[in-house]
């Protein structure tokens, strides 16, 4: 990967049970939903958030909001164990003092995909992003700073963590349509958490 992007294989395995049981609480108040992009496309990935800020898409654009538009209430708090995982993974990748204030939770089913994009709704591009994969494997696409730059493919497995920042922070990335290769614990789904400093 780029010089400021790191794949930490299996780093989240000790946290997997805690992450999965926390999802039950999060989705009870802020359910997974398929957002509609400003262009009018319904995302194949279902998403929810926890933490102070949640990422949303609607016909007006992409942004972070302190309130879940589903019910107009704040997003569920970020569990302490999420903060700890993100902080420890950041340190392992050489990013000190990372304290996330947003956690996007993406749920993929067979066929779900995420087209090439940059993560640029955050206020501060100095902070890294930490991504945690659980469940079915996915083929991740990692491009350059322009949409048309060549991409490389990286397979991400249950428990893998990716940390990126610095000069790689704004690189285009995406996820290929998921194949149905059921995971022994999660079955036919993949859950991805991305921890960010949004505010
Ligand atoms: C970006 N999620 O939610 S995270 C997203 O697997 C998102 O759900 C994907 O992109 C997912 O915005 C991918 C993993 C990742 C890894 C390395 C990157 C994103 C990256 C390097 C540069 C930029
Ligand atoms: Fe992204």
Image (spheres, rainbow, N blue to C red):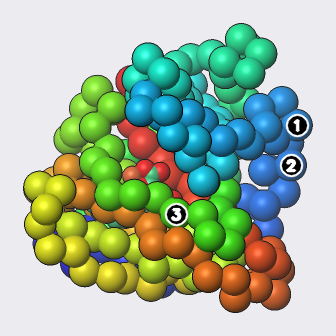
User: Which residue appears at 76% of the width and 85% of the height?
Assistant: 182
Q: Tell me the residue that label 1 is attached to.
A: 28
- Could you tell me how far apart the alpha carbons at marks 1 and 3 are, in whole angstroms? 24 Å
The location of residue 162, given as percent across then percent down, is 40, 68
Ligand 1 has an atom within 8 Å of the beta carbon of the residue at disc 1: no
Please state which of residues 55 and 10 is positioned toward the viewer in this rendering: 55
Is 49 on the left-hand or right-hand side of 129?
A: right
Ligand 1 has an atom within 8 Å of the beta carbon of the residue at disc 2: no
Look at the picture and state if 30 lies above or below 34. Answer: above
Q: Tell me the residue that label 2 is attached to.
A: 24
Q: Residue furthest front?
A: 40
Judged by depth in the image, the label closer to the viewer, 2 or 3, is: 3
Q: Tell me the residue that label 3 is attached to.
A: 113
Q: Secondary structure at mark 2?
A: helix
Kindly indicate the quadrant of the structure image that contains residue 124.
Answer: top left
Q: Residue furthest top?
A: 72
Quadrant (top left/top right/bottom left/bottom right) for the C terminus: top left
- Regarding residue 69, the answer to whether it shows in the image is yes
């Amino acid at each position: 990967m780029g010089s400021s992007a790191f794949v930490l294989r299996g780093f989240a395995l000790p946290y997997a049970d805690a992450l999965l049981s926390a999802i039950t609480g999060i989705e009870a108040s802020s359910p997974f939903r398929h957002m509609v992009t400003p262009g009018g496309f319904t995302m194949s990935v279902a998403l929810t958030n926890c933490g102070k800020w949640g990422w949303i898409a609607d016909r007006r654009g992409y942004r972070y909001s302190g309130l879940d538009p589903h019910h107009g209430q704040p997003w569920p708090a970020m569990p302490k164990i999420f903060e700890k995982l993100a902080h420890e993974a950041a340190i392992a990748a050489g990013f000190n003092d990372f304290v996330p204030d947003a956690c996007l939770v993406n749920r993929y089913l067979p066929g779900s995909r995420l087209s090439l994009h940059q993560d640029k709704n955050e206020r501060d591009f100095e902070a890294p992003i930490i991504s945690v994969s659980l469940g079915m494997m996915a083929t991740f696409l990692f491009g350059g700073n322009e949409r048309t730059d060549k991409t490389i493919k990286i397979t991400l497995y249950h428990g893998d963590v990716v940390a990126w920042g610095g000069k790689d922070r704004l690189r285009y990335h995406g996820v290929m349509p998921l194949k149905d290769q059921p995971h022994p614990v999660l079955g036919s789904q993949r859950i991805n958490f991305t921890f960010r400093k949004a505010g």
